[in-house]
Image (tube, coloured by chain):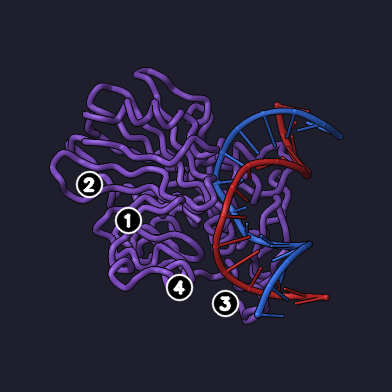
Chain colours: A purple, B red, C blue
Amino acid sequence: MPELPEVEVTRRQIEPLLLDREIAALETTADSYFFLTPAAELRRALKGRSFKALERRGKYLVGTLDDGWRVLFHLGMTGQLFSSEASSLRLLSATARSALAPEEQLKFRPDQHTHLHLRFRDQGPDVFFRDVRKFGKVLLLAPGDEPERLARLGPDALSVTGELLFASTRRRKTSIKALVLDQSVIAGVGNIYADEALFLAGVRPGRRASRVTRHECEKISTALRQVLERSIETGGSSISDFLAPDGTDGGYQDERRVYARAGDACYSCGTAIKRRVIAQRGTHYCPRCQK
DNA sequence: ATTCCAACCTGATAGC
DNA sequence: TGCTATCAGGTTGGAA
């Protein structure tokens, strides 16, 4: 599930594949929940253009075209942005893969879940956006257009300070976990890294935000930076669907301390990790280490 | 203003 | 074996 590190890893790998390459054609699936801009409009807008920048805003990617229009991407839950050079064997499930002829297993062929397929004038590697569940999004932006969904994002999780977090916890009745997941408070944190950071900070995810101290907010913001930066270094977490654009797995799932470890022993104290639903999300914590 | 919850979508898996 | 129910979670939008 792509959160800030997975989106950043994607950005770093896809950016060089997009910049200054003239788009010969964009192929798409039919209009659906995925397309915030009608597919035909998107095809027209991209043809003949090239990208001049690809930036990350929280979990969003924003590509700027050479004519000043921009394209907003969100990977949702199962979105994958990758190159035709990817070792794409692993893009498909084992069952889907076994249905393919051996030569088809080696090279990725766009399937019904491949909503965007970019071809370039230079005939180099293609770029695909595949998303099984269509929680991902693509949106075309006219020059100067700042959509609500970007405008309401809080500061990026990599630059958040304890001070800022503390300020936004005041008088909030909700849980600290819900607050950390709120993209208008901090942009980029999702379920995995929220649990991991709260573990490192020693704070129970269900604690009422208004009862978290200034010092604990410092620890949470430090922990957030630590887990996010470390995850980017290791290529992100490949717990369910994430695959880097080059087709490789991330490495951070091997460094998880609590996420999806319910019943297993805490690495610090040996107590069994608990799982319960907090902020409408499966939440994992150590009942002994986190107060 | 804040919080909660259903809806969006599909594949994997647990249970019968 | 095969079918059905349940779960996963990012974001939005509407209800409480």
Give the labeled residue for mark 3. Answer: A268
Asked if marks 3 and 1 fall on the same chain, the answer is yes
Dot in front, 3 or 2: 2
Give the labeled residue for mark 1. Answer: A245
Give the labeled residue for mark 2. Answer: A17
Give how far apart the Cα atoms at labels 4 and 1 are: 20 Å
Q: Earlier in the sequence, mark 1 or mark 2?
A: 2
Give how far apart the Cα atoms at labels 2 and 4 are: 29 Å
Identify the subunit bearing mark 3.
A
Dot in front, 3 or 1: 1
Secondary element type, mark 1: loop
Give how far apart the Cα atoms at labels 1 and 2 are: 10 Å
Provide residue A217's location: percent of width, then percent of height: 58, 49
Dot in front, 4 or 1: 1
The amino acid type of the residue labelled 2 equals Leu
Q: Earlier in the sequence, mark 3 or mark 4?
A: 4
Give how far apart the Cα atoms at labels 3 and 2 are: 42 Å
Which corner quadrant of the image does residue A231 belong to? bottom left
The amino acid type of the residue labelled 3 equals Ser
Give the labeled residue for mark 4. Answer: A254
The answer to whether mark 1 and mark 2 are in CB contact below 8 A is yes
Rendered position, A228 above or below A143: below
Q: Earlier in the sequence, mark 2 or mark 4?
A: 2
Secondary element type, mark 4: helix
Provide residue A50's location: percent of width, then percent of height: 22, 32
The amino acid type of the residue labelled 1 equals Pro
Q: Earlier in the sequence, mark 3 or mark 1?
A: 1
